[in-house]
Amino acid sequence: MNLLPPDPATPQAPVNLLIVDDVPQNLVAMQALLRRDGVNLLCAASGAEALELLLEHEVALALLDVQMPEIDGFMLAELMRGSQRSRDIPIIFLTASPNDPVRAFKGYETGAVDFLHKPIEPQVILGKVNVFIELYQQRQLLKARNDALERALKLNETMTAVLTHDLRTPLSAILLCADKLGLDLPADNAGAQQTLRHLEASTLRMARMVEQLLDFSRIRTGGLHLQAGPCDLGEVTSAVVVEVAGLQAARVDYRASGDVHLHGDPDRLGQVAANLLGNALAHGGEGGVQVHLDGSLASHVVLRVRNAGHIDAALMPRLFEPFKASFHRSNGLGLGLYIADQFVRAHGGQLQARNEHHEVVFEARLPRRIGEDATLLF
């Protein structure tokens, strides 16, 4: 009598069960009891034969007779646990010996999930086997879904990288055309000049978003490298302040104190400063932004960016997550703080944010020299 209910989620590939017993009649009886659609029974008359089957097949459950010549059930279980391929296979021991707590303890010690004494009730063994078949099928389904999700994420990242890379060419063409139009437009045509300024600003904003997506894709795929060397962080930050403040016609108070030289990647550190400054101007720049580069410490250079505002307590733990850092309406993607945080981490530093009175302060602590293992971002 087959008590195993049909499983509608049974995968196309059959589930393998391993039965090991040196008595042929026991193997025949177990086959008759456990045979069902979607289940493949692998029978072995010895421990050595069982090990050969385990090398060829993935097994959902092993039913091992304890008393066998040469390699008994306990020894076989220990050998299975010693192999990466079979160490996680559930084991049920079957024995005709009297109930002995010492032997049962030895069975559990070798990794058994159960220890049954012959003669075994059919309902008992069928119920236990059914549970492990369902668990195996669920694990296989979860693994297949995870594999499909990983493939989808990989495809999405590849598509993002290709798309953003290809977008740079038409954006460059738009900017070139805008420059040419600026040269040809009469200075007294205020409406056209205003439209042209909007066109340039929008194109530059889109270009920055494309670059952020490219950086995000490189970070996710491990394709972004640091080009570390001697770096004057004051020179880098000053250039960023002039560029960003000029583009946005904003007031930025910048000052540097102490020795602001360190060993790092000037381009990536410039992006850190630009992203922090851009974030400050977008979310609290009406009253101006303060940028302070502090080189008074022997071990670190500290970059602080301060603006009016407040970060909600609920958002603070997620501030540096991708696509979740925008705590006000903005024209960005929410990647700037994530990328800044990743670049600071790549240098062996730490980026933090805090509310201070009625201001928001971002503080990047950058070591003066990064380790050799930090030359690769991920």
Image: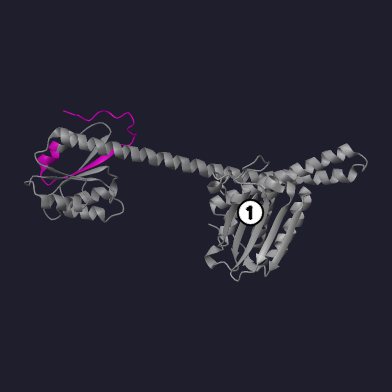
Q: Is residue 9 magenta?
A: yes
Residue 133 shown left or right of residue 320 in the figure = left
Between residues 365 and 133, which one lies in front from this camera angle? 365
Q: Mark 1 Cα within 10 Å, few/some/many (few <14, many 20+)?
A: many
Residue 48 shown left or right of residue 301 in the figure = left
Q: Residue furthest front?
A: 357
Q: Is residue 140 above or below residue 66?
A: above
| Displayed quadrant of residue 205 | top right
Which percent across, then down, holds residue 175?
A: 78, 45
Quick check: can you spot residue 224? Answer: no
State the extent of the magenta-drawn residues as a range: 1-29
Q: Quadrant of the N terminus?
A: top left
Between residues 148 and 300, which one lies in front from this camera angle? 300
Residue at which label 1 appears: 361
Q: Is residue 24 magenta?
A: yes
| Displayed quadrant of residue 135 | top left
Q: Is residue 235 above or below residue 330?
A: below
Which percent across, then down, holds residue 201?
A: 77, 44
Q: Is residue 43 above or below residue 299?
A: above
Q: Residue at x 42, y 39 (%)?
A: 145
Q: Residue at x 37, y 37 (%)?
A: 141
Q: Residue at x 12, y 35 (%)?
A: 121
Q: How many marks?
A: 1
Which percent across, then down, holds residue 109?
A: 19, 53
State the colouring used for the structure image: one colour
Q: Residue furthest left?
A: 98
Under tag 1, what secondary structure?
A: strand
Q: Residue at x 77, y 50 (%)?
A: 250
Instruction: Name the residue type under label 1.
Output: Val
Quick check: can you spot residue 15? Answer: yes
Which percent across, then down, holds residue 300?
A: 60, 67
